[in-house]
Amino acid sequence: MQLGAIYEYLDEISPFELQEKWDNSGILVGAKDQEIKRIVLALDVTLELAEEHEEDTLFLVHHPLIFSPLKQMDFDYYPANIMRRLIQKNQSVIAMHTNIDKTHLNRYVFERVLGLRIDKEAEFMLQDTRRFATKELYALLGRKLGLDNFKVVNEKPELSGVALTTGSGSSMMDMCETDCFLTGDIKYHEAMKAQQQDLMLVDIGHYESEKFFADALSSDLKNLDISVIISNSKNPFKTVAL
């Protein structure tokens, strides 16, 4: 199957034009007339993943391998070291980042993983306006996201609604109309702002909230006449106990 045909199908189910202006989704490595023998679904493409899989593999990933403009291609450093191996093995990369957030990933995590109800939706943010006990919410997050701890700002015992943006979404807190906002990568000054606005923030982790990318997309790929392999990406962070 040609890379261009796969790209066109992906563009139908989650249009690349939906991506944010700062994003870099789409074909990052490869050519549209390139023959693809298999698809590997992963959160990220790594050097280990490129080494592990055969030639003519398409890595369909969430995070763009190329994000900022490249000023040089030094093969000793990321991401050029990965790109060299991909090219050597005739492998290709398509990234589905902010477009898939809007069409698939946020909804999948909110409804399918956490079992929440979508009462309000605004691109990256989904909101369930029902009342929640905070302790029950903590238990749900721990059970469904595999978390045994998380950072919290402005904790409240009872909540009139919960909102979610997967990945790094705390910059969108002004859109939140509920008592609590779940997202990852919360910065110090964003925490201070939320505290002043009486908004509870729960940092559920960037990786932890986006690790469901492959699951969210896999069912749509069953319509393609090509083998699809799900690769469980690893969290680059490690928790160290003192």
Image (tube, rainbow, N blue to C red):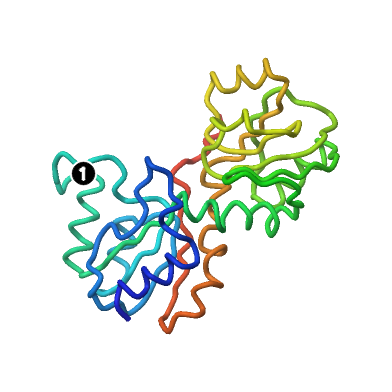
Q: Is residue 146 left or right of residue 168?
A: right
The image quadrant of residue 136 is top right
Q: In this rendering, is residue 235 above or below 32?
A: above
Furthest residue to the front?
A: 17
- The residue singled out by tag 1 in the image is 77
The answer to whether residue 188 is above or below residue 99 is: above
Secondary structure at numbered mark 1: loop
Residue at 56% from the left image edge and 23% from the top image edge: 190
Residue 42 in percent (x, y) is at: 44, 61
At a point 38% along the width and 70% down the height, the residue shown is 8
In the image: residue 60, left or right of residue 161: left
Q: Position of residue 135 (x, y in %)?
A: 82, 37
Q: Horizontal placement of 159 versus 72: left or right?
A: right
As rendered, which of 171 and 138 lies closer to the eye?
171
Residue at (47, 53) in percent of width and height: 99
Frontmost residue, 237 versus 220: 220
